[in-house]
Image: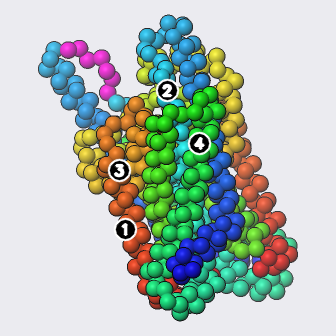
Amino acid sequence: MSPWAATVGHELRSAGRERLPQLLLMIFIGMSAASAFIGSAAKATVTEVYNSAAGQGLTNAANPFGNVPPLYYARNTVIYILLIGALLAIVIGVQSAMRDRRARTIDLVLTRCLSPAGYLGAKMTGIGLGLLAVLGASALISVLCISAVTGSIPAPDQLLRLLALFGVAWLFLLFFVALGTLSGLHASSYTTALLVPIVIWSVIIFVLPLLGTAAHPVSLLNPVTPPAAPQTGIFALTRSLTGPLSLGEQFKHVAAILLKDPQATGTMTGGITVILVFLAAGISAVVLTGRTSMRKELHD
Amino acid sequence: MTSLITLCGKELRDLSCNRSVRLLIAFLAVVVVLSVLVAAADFRTKTADYTSYLAALKASGGAVNAPPPDLFPLQMLRAGMEYLEIVGSLFAVILGYGLIAKEKNNGTLELLFTRPLGRHSFAAGKILAALVIWTAVTAALFAVITATLLIAGNAPLTGTDFIRLIIAAAHTTIYLTLWSLAALALAALTRSPATGLVLALVLWLVVVLVIPQIGDTMDPDNQIPGGLFASLQIDKAHEHAVMANFTGYETSRDLIEQTSLTKQYERPLFAWLGIKDQYNQQSPAFVWAGTFNHTLWLLAGFAAAAAAALLAGTRDKLLRKA
């Protein structure tokens, strides 16, 4: 077995043994499963509310939920990917880098015929494969739950869209794995290694969208596409500056188009490009980490 | 008592010298101030839009029916309060974890417990320090927020507004200290403080983000951009009449939300600041009558976290795990 394949295998086994990522994983998969049922309860209530209002002659408007596609039930999953998935990815990345530094195995590994870039690339591949398995399981659970709620299996086109969503989610989460790994490789302590990427995550998810659109932080947790952002005054400028950096909003936009949200407009090209640029930057920064940084001593 | 004060004083000196803590608090202040500036800019944009709409309407000879946007200065604090709710609590977790982690990592625990300390003095000193530090930080944050509102937001504040701000600051102090104490207890109870940190982060994720998110997304009015009832052109009075038929669903949704202490903090906070329309410009007695139960739940959560920290931070438990 080549050192590269051995490292990939070792990474998969080690990640599988860690209890804390397992806890986050259970929450993530549990919430993915609950997502369809939460959507179903909300949709049923909205329809009843509409029928009640229409019955009393309070509205002539059409039922906004009259023709909801099955993919509607996966909308909450997008938010759980942003929140739980991203934190899970950070924790996995940090723990992967910290494992070697804590046990001082990195000194031994680097005596073998494997370059630091090759070793770190293999580690990222291992985590990427593990994450792919997790998202594959989540996708399967989503399909099963949507089928249970709607009473029929989604059509092939809808299944493809759902798979595409989890594919984009994989790219999105890999950036956070890279961020966590990078932090784990460079931080002087476990605490700092965990905190720095979490602060960056909170800025990306909650702060940047506010600067560009004046959207309230809690409203960003609602899967409903927000009303069009102000296009005038200072927001036209701040949006052009912070929009491309708002990785979470870019992911939500791509997801909304994939899930055929009627309120979502535009194309996915910009969003996917931003996600890929972030991912490429993150992975490059990880694999370019030097031997000295990797062997740096920990202070806790 | 003397040892408690000594421990608390030492903790406060350590925290004030800690560069990471200072950076996190400065970051929190910047984010909250930015949110007020953004809210002020948003209000100016809306006012400018209204003025140009009015001018266009007058030029075309139309009658003006739409009222101008109302300025309620404390409503500009909504995003800032949400940052304290989410990011503030995250930093409180980090601070609480740090109170135990540094002793465990530096090996000072054994040394501390060679002194004649009371059974709960060590934990009580830490709890008091957390309370003092968050009182000071919240007071500073609210002072900065108020100054930003007055200067950049150009918002006139009345005497009642200042009282409302003080009550909001008191709720915030309890909420943030609660998170620090919960993290302190978990860091004390786990073999490795890092494990305690991740457990505290999982707890934070569930309580601060997941439960409120479930409640919010189950709200029928949150299903359509701009609100379901607005899209159906149904006014508030009729909205309440319609929703009266869905009390079972609303009660379940409310119960889900109420299991999160974040919502127990948010509800009185938004009421006192007039962010919730039903409490805007209402008397303090009215706001208190509508929200005191949430304040009491928040206090109960605080008491539970303090008790957990007190019981977890004993010599037996800390040295057994160290």
Q: Amino acid at mark 1?
A: Ala
| On-image quarter of the N terminus of chain A | bottom right
Identity of the amino acid at label 3? Gly
Of the numbered discs 2 and 1, the one sitting upstream in the chain is: 2
Query: What chain is tagged by disc 1?
Result: A
Q: Which mark is residue A68?
A: 2
Q: Secondary structure at mark 4?
A: helix
Give the residue displayed 24% in from the left and 35% down from the top: B48
Magenta region? B62-68
Viewer-closest of A145 and B322: A145
| CA distance separating discs 2 and 1 | 38 Å
Residue B245 at x, y = what percent?
Answer: 64, 16
Q: Are marks 4 and 1 on the same chain?
A: yes
Left or right of residue B76, residue B52 in this image = left
Is label 2 on the same chain as label 1?
Answer: yes
In the image, are marks 1 and 3 on the same chain? Answer: yes
Q: Residue at x 67, y 54 (%)?
A: A26
First in sequence, mark 4 or 1: give its number.
4
User: Tag 4, which chain?
Assistant: A
Residue B318 image offset from top left, x and y in percent: 79, 75
The 10 Å Cα crowd at callout 1, few under 14, some 14 to 19, many 20 or more, is some
Q: Chain for mark 2?
A: A
Task: Identify the residue position indicated by label 1 in the image.
Answer: A281
Q: Residues within 10 Å of mark 4 (few under 14, many from 20)?
A: many
Q: Residue at x 65, y 52 (%)?
A: A27
The correct choice, above or below, for A141 with respect to B124 in the image is: above
Task: State whether residue B206 appears in this view.
Answer: no
